Amino acid sequence: MVKLIGRRLIQMVLIILVASLLLFAIFDTPEFKRRLAVQELGGFAVSALSQDAYNEWLARRGLDVPFYQRYFNWIGKIVQGDFGFSYEKNRPVGPLLADRLANTGILALCVFALMIPISLTLGVLSGMREGSGLDRSITFLSVFTTSIPEIATAIILTVVFALGLGLLPAKSAMIAGFDPWQLVLPVLTLVIYDFGYVARMTRASMAEVMTSQYIRTAILKGIPYRRVVMKHALRNALIAPFTVIVLQMNWLLSGVVVVEVFFEYDGFGKLLLEAALFPDVEVVQACTLVAVVVAVTSQIISDVGYTFLNPRIRFS
Amino acid sequence: MKREETTRLHPKAAEAKDLMERGRLSRRGFIRVAALTGLSAAAAYAMAGLPQPAYAQSMADLPFPEPEGTPQMGGILKVGMQVQKMEDPATYSWTEMSNQTRHTLEYLAYTTPDNVTHPMLAERWEASDDLSEWTFYLRKGVTWHNGDELVADHVRWNVERWCDPNLGSANVGLSSISALVEEVDSGEKNEDGTAKMVKKLRDGAIELVDDHTIRFKLSKPVLSFPEDMYNYPTAILHPSFEAPFSDNPIGTGPFALAELVVGDRCILKRVTEVNGAPFEYWGGDVYLDEIHYYNFDEDNQLTAFASGDIDAIYEFGVEQMELAKALEGEIIAARTAQTLCVRFQVDKAPWDDKRVRQAFVKACDNPAVLPLVYAEGGDVGWNHHVAPIHPEYFELPALERDVEGAKALLADAGMEDLDVTVDVGNTDGPWQQTICEVIRDQVKDAGITLNINVMPPSKYWEIWDKTAFGATQWTHRPLGTMVLSLGYRTGVPWNETKYANPEFDAALDEAEAILDVEERRAVMEKVEKILQDDAVMVQPVFRPVYTIVNAKVHGYPAHPTQYHQFNKVWVES
Amino acid sequence: MAVTSLSPPPVPLLKRLQKPRIAALIFAIAWLPLMAYVMAGDQLGDLEQYVLVPAIPAVILLYLICMAAFRESWIALLGATLVFFWFFIAVAAPYLPLIDPNKPIAPFTTPLTEKSGFFFWLGTDFKGRDMLSRTLWGCQRVLVWGVTATFVAYVVGTAFGLIAGYISGWWDEVISFLANVLLSFPVMVLFIVILNYLGPSGFNIVIAVTFASAPAIMRIVRGLVLDVKTRDYVFAAQTRGESALWIMVVELLPNVRGPIIVDACLRLGYTTVAITTLTFLGLGLQPPDPDWGLMIKESAKTAMLFKFSYMLLIPALSVSSLILGFNLMADGLREMSLRD
C-alpha cells in the first residue's frame, strides 16, 4: 500500500514537472508577451513603443530570460512555498489562490453535501429491483439530467428561479459579503449535472451485489428483504460509488469553470479562465499545479479507499 | 445676413439648450455654458426660464456643475467597473485606473461632460498671441491630504516628471508637453553606433512666476494646452509621491483611497480631517460619503446592475440597450467624438490608387449607417474625423452616395469586381463589426466584395497601424485639431493611413494657431475638405457611450470619455 | 414435391444495408458533403448550393437503417431519432425556407409575432436575427466540429492504444506515461490552456479535444487489446508471418469495435458539451455564423430578463436535446450489446 502511494506521488511530481515546463514553453511565444504588454500598457501605447522600450519592458517584467531559466527559478520558489506574483490582480499568487480555492471549496462542499445523499439513495433504490418501473424512471432521469450541459442547466434555473419567479439572485458576485442565497443556483446546477452519473454507478454496483450468491442465499433463508438490503447489500454496494465520488473532485475542478463564469462567482475556475486569457502566466501555473495535485490526490484516495474498503482485496 | 449672424446661438449654447430641454442638463448648468460661449447672463437666464439672481453666484468661480435638485448629504455610490491597479498616475494606460484616482487627484483643467474645458486647480489661464506661451494661475487655498498647500512648484515637479525619459509617461505625446522637450544625445550609443537620442525638458521651458503662477514656454504654438491638462495621465501629484499610488494616496480631491483589491473592489472615502484638523475641500460641497467601485467585466456590468448590486456602471454596449430599457434606471447616452475609422493605407495596393479609395467611399452611404448600429444617440461622420461635438466643427455639405460614380471610377482604375478584406478587432465591442457589415452590404451595390476578418482585440492592436485595410477605433479628444494632428499629419507615429499631404499639414498648422473658436472653424472647412476629398477612410459614425444609473442617483455625469468626476453626485436615501 | 433448388430466403433491403461497409458508405455520402460545406464552404464556389443535395436522402436512409438495427431498444430509437433530427436539419438547412440567419431584421422580437413583414416563430435575438433560423443553422457547426473532433481523437487514441497494447514494452511505458500526464489535467484546464495557445477556431478545437480525449480512448483500447491479443486467430496471423501493422488493423481492430462504438456515442456527447461551453467562454467558434454556444454567450449579456429568456432557453434546449440523443443512443447500444 505504502509502495503504491509512493509510486503515485513520484508520478505526480514527475507530471507536475513536465506539465509546468510545457506551460512555460507555451507562454514563451512573442505573441503572448505582446498580449501581456497590450493588457498592461494598452494597445495604442504598445504599438507606439520602440523596440528598445519594449525590450526594457520585457526586462522589467523578467520576460527577457529564456523560459527554462524562468522555469527553474519558478521551481526554486515553489519549493519555498512562493507561488509567484499575479500581474493582473497585482498581488502574490499564494493568498489570491487561497481565497479563490476557499470560495470554490465552499461551493464544492455544498455540492457534495447535496449530491452524495441524493445520488446514493436513488442509485440504491434503482439497483435494488433491477428492471422495475422505479428503476427505469430513475435511470431515465439520470441519463436526462447528465445530458443537459451545465451551461443549459444554469440558464434554465436562472430563467425560472431568478428572472421568472424572482426568488433567487441571478448572479453570485457576493459584492456585499457572503450571501448563502447567491450560492443556491450554482450549487443546484452542479448537483443536477453530477448526481445522475454517481446514481448510475451506485445502481450498477447495487444491482451486481443483489444478484450475488450470498444475497440470494440470505433472501432464500427467509431474512426479511429490508434487512438483507440494509445489513448485507448496502455495505458492499457502496464501495464502487465511493471511488466514483472521490474522483468527482477532479471533475468538479473542470465543471466549476463555466458555472463560476456564468454566475460571476469568484472561485478557482473563474480565476483560471481570466488568468489564461490575460495571460497571467504564474497564476495559470499555480492553478494547473493545484488542479494536478487535486486530480492525483483524488486518484490516490480512491485507490487506497477502494483497497481499504474492499475485503476481497484487503485480505488477499 | 448680418442680422442672422448676431442672433445665431453659439452651437455649444444651442446644444446646451437642447440638453437642458431634454432634461439632461440642469438649468444652472446651461447658464454656465451659455456664459462661456459669450451669451449675456440676462439672455441665458431668460432662456433657462430662471429669474436672474440679484447677486453674483457663490459658485461662479468653481468649475463644477450645480447639483440637480436639492442634494442630500451622505450615502454610498456603488459603481460597476473593472478595478485595476493604481501604480503611477502619470503612466496610467486605462481610463478605469484614472477613474479610481480622479476623486483623489485633480487636474489643472476640467473638461465637463459637454466638452467645454474649465479651469480646475488653476483659477484661470492666459495664452500669448502666438499660442507659444501659456500662463496658469493656480487656485489659492487648495490643500493636500497631508496639510500642505498646493503651490506652483508642485505643478513644476509634475511637469518635469512627465518629461523624464526614464518614466515613460504618455503625456510626452501630448502636443503641449512635447513642445516643452527637446531631443538630446543621451551619451549612450545605439547598436548601429549612432548616438542614442532621448527627449528631455528644455532649459527654461518652465518658469515659476510666483507661488501660484507658472508659465510654460513652448517650442511651437499649441492650441490644446488646457484640454491636455485634463487628459487622464496628467493628474497633479504631491511631490512626495512614490509608486504605487495606492500605498500613499495623497491628493487634493474630496476622497481618499480606503481599500484596493485589484480585480475585486476599490473603496474611496470622503476626507474629513487632515492632521487632526478638519479638511476643507476647495471645490465646495461634496455629497457622497463613499464611492465603491466593484469589479465587473464590461459584458457583465449591466446584468450586475439588473440584479441591484450596483447603482451605476462604467458602460454598456448598444447590444444591451433593450435589456437596459427594461430595467429601472436612467439611461444616459453621452455624445462623443469616439469613432471607427475604416481606413485605407494609402501606400499599399489597391489603395495607393486614389480612384479606388474614392470609389469605395462613394459607394458608402454614411447617414444610413448610424441608425443600423446605434438606435439612440450618436452623430454621423463624414470621413474627416472631426465630430459635431468638437467646438471647431465645420459642417461640410453632406456627401451624396454615388454608386454609378463608384463603378465608373473602379472601371477607370481597372478594378472592377474589387475584392478586399478588412481587419476588425472589435477592440471596444461588437459595434465595430456591425459597422463593417453595414458597409459590406452598401459597397456590394457597386460590385465591391468586402470580406470581414474578425480578430481578437489584442491581435488587432498588434497590426492596427500595419494592415493595409483595417477598422481602427479612435477615442474622444476634446478638440478636432488634436485628433487630426495625432493621426493624419505626415509621418507622425500614429498615422495609420500613411497619409502624407503637405497642403493638409499646412492648413492644420493654420487652424492650430487660432485660439478663437469661431475663427478657427472657418479654417477647419479647408482642413476637413482636404481630408475628405483624399478619401483615406470611411468614418460614418461618432458613437454615443451608454451608461445607466439608478433613479436615486442624481447628477451622474455623462462624460464623452467616461471620466468619472462625482463631486456633485448625490444619492437619495 | 420438394423444392429442389433452395434459393436463400430474401433478405430485407434494410437488413442488407446494415452491413458495416454499406452503412459506412451511406454515412460517407451524408457526412463528407456536410463537412466540406461547413469547413470549406468558401472554397466550394457555385458547388456550395448543390453539395448537400445528395446528403439529404442519405441521412434519411441512414435513419431507416438505424431504426431497423435498433428496434430492440426504444431508448436507442429515441436517441437515434433526436440525433438524426439534427443531422437532417444540418444537411437540409440550406434548402429550408429560412430567413438568412445573419441578417438583422427586428431586434428583440418575441416568439410568434410578426414584424417587418416576417413571422418569427421563435423570435429574434439582440441584433434582430431570426432565432429559428439561427438555431437550425447552428446545429451544423456544433455537429460537424463535434463529430470531427471525436473522430480524430478516436483515430489518434486507437492508434496509440493498439501500439501500446500489442507491441507493449517501452512503447507502452512511454505512451502510458504521456497519457497519465494528460489525464492528470482536469479537462477544462487542458482545453483552456491549449485553445488559449492556439487561438480560438474550429480546427483548434479538434486539436484540443484530441489532446483531452485521446488518452482515455487509448487506455480503453489498450485494455481491450491486451485481452484480445492472446486469442488463437492472433497467433495464427503471427505464425503466418503477418506484419504487426496488419495484425493490429485487420485482426485486432474489428474485434474491439463493439465497446468502442458505445464509448464513442458517449464521447460525442461530451465533445458537444465541450464545444458549446468553450464557445460560451470565448475560446471556441467565432462569430458571426450561428452556433449554439455563441447564441448563449451573446444572450447571456443582452437578454438576462424573463421576457427575453427565450434567447437563452432555445439554444440551451437544442444542445441538450442533441446530447441527450447521443447519450440515449449509447445507453441503448450498451443494453443491446449486453443482451447478445
Image (cartoon, coloured by chain):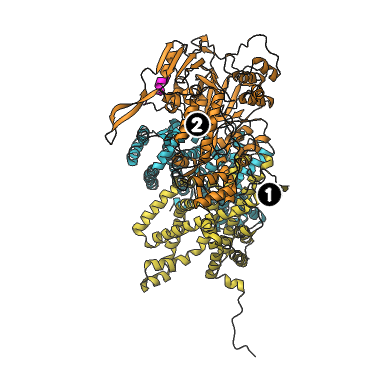
Chain colours: A cyan, B orange, C yellow
From the viewer's perspective, is the residue at label 1 or at label 2 nearer?
2
Furthest toward the left, the residue is: B193
- The residue pinned by badge 1 equals C122
Percent position of residue B7, x then y:
66, 22
What type is the residue that disc 2 sits on?
Val
In this orientation, which residue lies closer to the viewer: B415 or B183?
A: B415
Q: Provide the secondary structure element on which disc 2 rests.
A: helix
Residue B220, image quadrant:
top left
In this orientation, which residue lies closer to the viewer: A262 or A57?
A: A57
In this orientation, which residue lies closer to the viewer: C255 or B113?
A: B113
Residue A46, image quadrant:
top left
| Residue B55 shown in magenta | no
Magenta residues, start to end: B159-167
Chain of the residue on which disc 2 is drawn: B
Chain of the residue on which disc 1 is drawn: C
Percent position of residue C40, x then y:
51, 57
- The residue pinned by badge 2 equals B483
Q: Quadrant of the N terminus of chain C?
A: bottom right
Q: Is residue B208 left or right of residue A205?
A: left
Q: Residues within 10 Å of mark 1 (few under 14, many from 20)?
A: many
- Label 1 close to label 2 by CB (< 8 Å): no
Q: Provide the secondary structure element on which disc 1 rests.
A: loop
Q: Residues within 10 Å of mark 2 (few under 14, many from 20)?
A: some
How far, Cα to Cα, is label 1 from label 2?
46 Å
